[in-house]
Image (cartoon, helix red, strand yellow):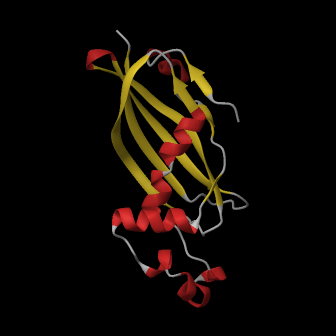
Amino acid sequence: MAKRIVESPQAMKALVGQELGVSDWLVMTQERINTFAEASGDHQWIHVDVERCKTDMPDGKTIAHGNLTFSVISTFARDVLKIENMRNGINYGSNKVRYTSPVQVGARIRGRQKLLAADDMPNGGIRMTYQWTVEIEGQERPACVAETMSIAYAKA
């Protein structure tokens, strides 16, 4: 899907309530899972022990960390939206994150972004609240539903 380009942070207000777009597919590889395990210190066997998972996990596959599934939303965001005339932007946090289905190694996932709110902030900022749904190809139930927030500051 083509990336949506918005003229400025202020212009985001006109898009409240709309789906902004859907990212490209991303394949969840064992290398990505292992790298996340190293970075986070979470080496639970369901993520990194490929041999044990062959016998002790459904379908015999490892699964991605929930926080890894959440963290790739930032990759999806680059696919979906570009705000022009922006000085800079910051991550403002998350209101709610739910992991509703595991992401098995080899699965293809993508992000669907909806703008829930766009509120004025000091210094020319717009605080945006998004709903992200991380979809798993071929499955009805999503991997993750998250409400995230960021602030974009307009160029002076």
Q: Quadrant of the C terminus?
A: top left
At x 36%, y 46%, the residue is: 95
Name the spot of residue 77 as percent of width and height, x first.
53, 38
Q: Is residue 107 above or below residue 81?
A: below
Residue 45 visible in the snapshot: yes
> Percent from the top left, x then y, of residue 119?
37, 24
Examine the image and state in which quarter residue 79 appears. top right
In the rendered image, the residue lying farthest to the bottom is 55
Whole-percent x, y for residue 5 in the image: 59, 22
Is 32 drawn above or below residue 148 in the view shown?
A: below
Outermost residue toward the left in this view: 122
Q: Residue at x 66, y 49 (%)?
A: 25
> Which residue lies at the image location 55% right of the left edge and 23% below the top edge?
15
Residue 81 lies, with reference to residue 54, above or below; the image says above
x and y percentages locating residue 100 in the rendered image? 53, 63
Whether residue 152 is visible, yes or no, is: no
Of the pair 51 and 1, the residue shown nearer to us? 51
Question: Closest to the observer: 50 or 4?
Answer: 50
Residue at horizontal 62 percent and vertical 26 percent from the top: 4
Residue 63 sits in which quadrant?
Answer: bottom right
Tell me if 59 is positioned left or right of 16 in this view. right
Q: Quadrant of the N terminus?
A: top right
Count of residue discs: 0
In this rendering, would 44 be left or right of 11? left
Q: In the image as oriented, which residue stretches furthest toward the top?
A: 156
